[in-house]
Image (cartoon, rainbow, N blue to C red):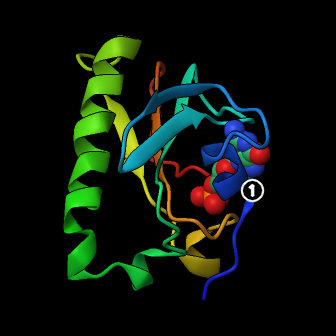
């Protein structure tokens, strides 16, 4: 059984976060340390530590992460100019929190650099 992270506490609202979207599969909230005017994390409500742990059972949830990203990008007004969706995996990928999350980053030109 994977160890819970601070993100499980955010989903359960045991610690505060600026939650911008939630449904039965995913929760989205603003990154505590934003690297751009829009920096939102979209996470599954189910604890999946890394991309390496994703299975076929998670396909609906993974798809929902993308449709929510698209909606939030529209709400944030970054759709037309563009934005970046990023999922870090493990140490070399720069993953810090072991509850899979998609970064939605936009609101400025991002260049070739990565988040993290
Ligand atoms: P990673 O490096 O794992 O891909 O990204 C983890 C992200 O989670 C970082 O951008 C970091 O700023 C964010 N983060 C870490 N702890 C918290 C927290 O307690 N609240 C929020 N809103 N974001 C967090």
Quarter in which the N terminus is drawn: bottom right
Q: Position of residue 94 (x, y in %)?
A: 63, 68
Vertical placement of residue 38 versus 65, above or below: above
Asked whether mark 1 lies closer than 8 Å to ligand 1, one says yes
Q: Residue at x 69, y 70 (%)?
A: 4
Seen as rendered, the residue at the extreme right is 15
Vertical placement of residue 20 versus 10, above or below: above
Q: Position of residue 90 (x, y in %)?
A: 58, 79
Q: Nearer the viewer, residue 86 or 53?
A: 53
Local crowd at mark 1 within 10 Å, few (<14), some, or many (≥20)? few
Q: Quadrant of residue 73?
A: top left
Q: Which residue is mark 1?
A: 6
Vertical placement of residue 22 versus 63, above or below: above
Q: Quadrant of residue 72?
A: top left
Q: Nearer the viewer, residue 39 or 99?
A: 99
Q: Residue at x 30, y 36 (%)?
A: 68
Quarter in which the C terminus is drawn: bottom right
Q: Position of residue 28 (x, y in %)?
A: 49, 37
Q: Residue at x 32, y 48 (%)?
A: 65
């Amino acid at each position: 059984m994977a160890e819970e992270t601070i993100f499980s506490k955010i989903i359960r609202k045991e610690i505060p976060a600026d939650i911008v979207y939630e449904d039965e599969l995913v929760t989205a909230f603003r990154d505590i340390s934003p690297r751009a005017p829009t920096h939102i994390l979209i996470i599954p409500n189910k604890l999946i530590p890394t991309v390496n742990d994703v299975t076929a059972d998670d396909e609906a949830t993974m798809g929902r992460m993308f449709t929510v990203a698209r909606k939030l990008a529209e709400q944030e007004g970054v759709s037309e100019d563009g934005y970046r969706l990023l999922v870090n995996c493990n140490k070399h990928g720069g993953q810090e929190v072991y509850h899979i999350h998609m970064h939605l980053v936009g609101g400025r030109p991002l260049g070739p650099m990565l988040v993290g």
